[in-house]
């Protein structure tokens, strides 16, 4: 019962936040500027260096989505494999 109420409250809060959000933060290069542009590139420019290309360019297509989905799947498989140990079974050894 408490989990259901908590779920309703969380969903309501997220829905209200999305509906009531009017403005998207705008930067000089467009909305939602990341830390790499707003901080790292600025300090690199002040130091006289220019930003290099990333090793793994997640800005291409759905690569970032795939990385998050794959890591979630791996974490889910690990949690599922260890479910009994994580939740129900207690390996308590009473005095040897």
Image (cartoon, rainbow, N blue to C red):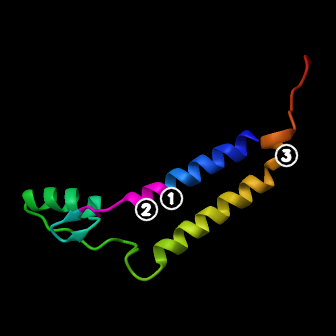
Examine the rendered structure and indicate whether residue 74 appears above or below residue 61.
above
Mark 2 residue element = helix
In the image, what residue occupies the spot 26% across and 61% down? Answer: 25
State which quarter of the image contains the N terminus. top right
Residue sitting nearer the eye, 53 or 75: 75
In the image, what residue occupies the spot 90% across and 16% down? Answer: 95
Residue 30's tag is none
Q: Residues within 10 Å of mark 3 (few under 14, many from 20)?
A: few
Examine the rendered structure and indicate whether residue 76 appears above or below residue 7.
below
Mark 2, residue position: 19
Q: Residues within 10 Å of mark 1 (few under 14, many from 20)?
A: few
Examine the rendered structure and indicate whether residue 1 appears above or below residue 66.
above
Q: Which residues are magenta?
A: 15-25
Residue 15's tag is 1
In the image, what residue occupies the spot 21% across and 60% down? Answer: 38
Of badges 3 and 1, the one in the foreground is 1
Residue sitting nearer the eye, 61 or 15: 15
In the image, what residue occupies the spot 86% across and 33% down? Answer: 90
27 horizontally vs 5: left or right: left
State the separation of the CA atoms marked 3 and 2: 40 Å
Q: In the rendered structure, which disc, 3 or 2, sits on the residue that comes first in sequence?
A: 2
The x, y position of residue 8, in whole percent, is 63, 50
Marks 3 and 2: CB-CB under 8 Å?
no
State the separation of the CA atoms marked 3 and 1: 34 Å
Mark 1 residue element = helix
Mark 3, residue position: 84
The x, y position of residue 74, in whole percent, is 66, 63
The x, y position of residue 30, in whole percent, is 22, 71
The x, y position of residue 51, in whole percent, is 20, 68
Marks 2 and 1: CB-CB under 8 Å?
yes
């Amino acid at each position: 019962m408490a989990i259901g109420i908590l779920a309703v409250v969380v969903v309501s809060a997220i829905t209200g936040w999305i509906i009531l959000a009017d403005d998207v933060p705008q930067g000089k290069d467009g909305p939602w500027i990341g830390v790499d542009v707003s901080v790292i590139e600025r300090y690199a420019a002040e130091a006289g260096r220019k930003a290099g290309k990333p090793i793994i360019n997640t800005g291409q297509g759905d690569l970032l989505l795939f990385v998050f989905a794959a890591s979630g799947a791996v974490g889910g498989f690990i949690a599922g494999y260890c479910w009994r140990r994580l939740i129900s079974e207690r390996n308590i050894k009473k005095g040897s």
